[in-house]
Each structure stands twice: as structure tokens, then as C-alpha cells.
Amino acid sequence: MSPLLIVVAIAVVLESGWPILYRAERTGLHRVPFRILKFRSMRIAPAGSHSHHSGDDDPRITRVGGFIRKFKFDELPQLLNVIIGKMSLVGPRPETTEYTKLYSEEEMVIFSVRPGITDEASIVFADLGSILSGGDPDHLYFEKVWGPKMELRMKYVREQSFLGDIKLIFRTLAAPFSGGAKDE
């Protein structure tokens, strides 16, 4: 993966300068916060402007950012999160600490497994940027994505298996090329 990581890093620097990586706090295994790593795909926002999500129509997304988001290359630095033990290749995608405060008692089971780079929700919502376009992305996230995503996360915890994880990895690799995801 090193050549791809280098090419993406150079493309990010050439288009929008430093920093190359975006670091954001997420909640992991046993509710322990950690910093998730991604290639930066947006211009740096002015202080005070804050949204947890962005649609494909967000003007802060750079040209390179749009490309690396489409093919999920922005997620590659999370391999470092896997190496240091904060994440797994497969597991429920980690949420911001602000959002995990909204989890119900039943949803807390999600913290019993290490968060992952991919899960079923990553495939179902592979085209999340288009789902969140055309309005307030945070509002659209809660309206269209939150409930189904939480169900998929809890289903993963209940049904996880090695074979299931292998299948999810291959399905994830195919998702950017499959023509979009199901809208729910």
C-alpha cells in the first residue's frame, strides 16, 4: 500500500498544502477515545465552522479530495490506527464522542468490539456524500442514516465471524466500483 499512500499524500500536498492528515477524535473499544487518521480531503475550515458530516456538494471538498473520497483512499491512513491497536480492519465504524453520547443502553454493545475501517454500513452507505447533499448534512445524517447504521453496527456485534469479516473486506473493496449504495 506504500506507493498508493505516497501518491495520495503528494496529491493532497500539491493541491492544498499541509497538513496531509486529518485527525479527529472518535470513541473506540470500551468507550476509550482515540484519534482517527484520514487523508485530508477538504480545505481547512475557519474557526467556528463545524459539521460532523459533509455532502458531495460541500464547497470545502478539494478536487483531489473528491477523488480520494469516491474511491475511499482517504481512509487508508486508518491502517496506522489498526497497527497501533486502536482499530481493526472490520468492525463498527467509530463515531465522534459527541454522537456516542446519544447511544441507547442497547447500542452500548457496540463498544464491546474494536471499531473497524469497514463494516456493513460502510457498504450500504458507500455513497454517503450524495445522501448528505442538498441540505444540512448533520440533519440528513440523523434523518436518513443514523437508525439503519446503528442497527447494522449492533448486528455486526451479534453475528461477527472470521468468514463474515473476510467477505466484508472483499465487498468493501468492490463498493466504490459497484455504482452506488442503497438509499434507506
Image: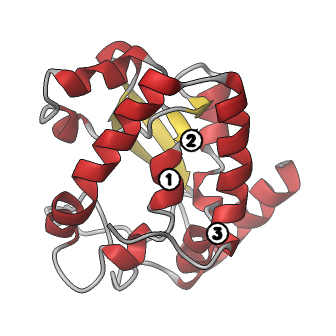
Quadrant for residue 168, please give it. top right
Image coords of residue 144 (percent x, y): 23, 65
Quadrant for residue 152, please give it. top left
Q: Which residue is mark 2?
A: 117
Disc marking residue 176: 3
Label 1: which secondary element: helix
Between the C-alphas of marks 2 and 1, the distance is 9 Å
Residue nearer the viewer, 50 or 57 = 57
Image coords of residue 5 (percent x, y): 76, 55
Residue nearer the viewer, 33 or 117 = 117
Q: Which quarter of the image is occupied by the C terminus?
A: bottom left
Q: Amino acid at mark 3?
A: Pro
Q: Earlier in the sequence, mark 2 or mark 1?
A: 2
| Pointers 2 and 1 in contact (C-beta within 8 Å) | yes
Identify whether 2 is placed above or below 183: above
Q: Nearer the viewer, mark 2 or mark 3?
A: 3
Q: Nearer the viewer, mark 2 or mark 1?
A: 1
Residue nearer the viewer, 145 or 69 = 145
Image coords of residue 54 (percent x, y): 32, 70
In the image, is 168 to the left or to the right of 93?
A: right
Q: Amino acid at mark 2?
A: Ile
